[in-house]
Image (cartoon, rainbow, N blue to C red):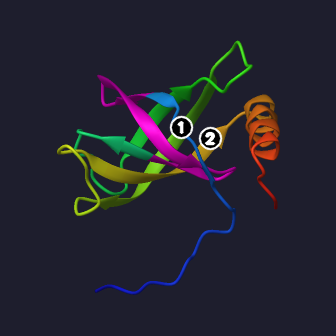
């Protein structure tokens, strides 16, 4: 049994959104488990090493244009898998102010509290 201390600064909202990922010219599409203003948890069959930079895009409900963000894989949990998928924690590193505002609106509408 492992114990750990929660280190996130922002609360997360559980949600299943399709997220498109691109890493080193390889494109794949997976689903989120949850999201916050600072990052996203993604379930994927792709093995991506901690520290890798990925380009992400995802559509929020009621938004026409996708949120486009660059993120860094900060953790990978092979033990927390389903159907041979790995769960990745990705921290947003480069997101426009407009996309950050769209994300904040989505989070507020889903009982997100800062």
- In the drawing, does residue 23 fall left or right of residue 35? left
Residue 81 painted magenta: no
Q: Residue at x 51, y 84 (%)?
A: 5
Residue 68 sits above or below residue 42 on the image: above
Residue span colored magenta: 20-41
User: Which residue is more in the foreground, 2 or 38?
Assistant: 2
The residue carrying mark 1 is 70
Residue at image coords 57%, 75%: 7
The answer to whether residue 83 is above or below residue 22 is below
Is disc 1 surrounded by few (<14), some (14 to 19) or many (20+) residues within 10 Å?
A: some
What residue did someone put label 2 on?
94
Q: Are marks 2 and 1 in contact (CB under 8 Å)?
A: yes
Q: Dot 2: few (<14), some (14–19), or many (≥20) neighbours within 10 Å?
A: few
Secondary element at tag 1 = strand
- Can you tell which quarter of the image residue 8 is in? bottom right
Q: Considering the image in quadrants, where does the N terminus appear?
A: bottom left
86 left or right of 20 in image: left
Residue at 64% across, 56% down: 12
Count of picture labels: 2
Q: Looking at the picture, tell me which residue is in the foreground, 88 or 74.
A: 88
Classify residue 44 by image quadrant: top left
**Residue drawn 81% across and 40% down?**
109
Residue 53's x, y, as percent? 41, 43
For residue 28, which numbered disc appears in the image?
Answer: none
x then y, percent, for residue 79: 23, 63
How far apart are the alpha carbons under marks 2 and 1?
A: 5 Å
């Amino acid at each position: 049994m492992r114990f750990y201390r929660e280190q996130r600064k922002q609360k997360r909202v559980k949600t299943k959104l399709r997220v498109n990922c691109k890493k080193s010219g390889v494109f794949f599409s997976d689903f989120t488990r949850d999201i916050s203003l600072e990052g996203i948890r993604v379930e994927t069959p792709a093995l991506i090493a901690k520290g890798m930079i990925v380009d992400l895009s995802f559509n929020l409900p009621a938004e026409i244009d996708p949120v486009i963000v660059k993120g860094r894989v900060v953790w990978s949990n092979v033990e927390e898998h389903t159907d041979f998928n790995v769960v990745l924690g990705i921290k947003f590193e480069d997101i426009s102010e407009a996309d950050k505002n769209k994300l904040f609106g989505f989070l507020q509408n889903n009982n997100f509290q800062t």
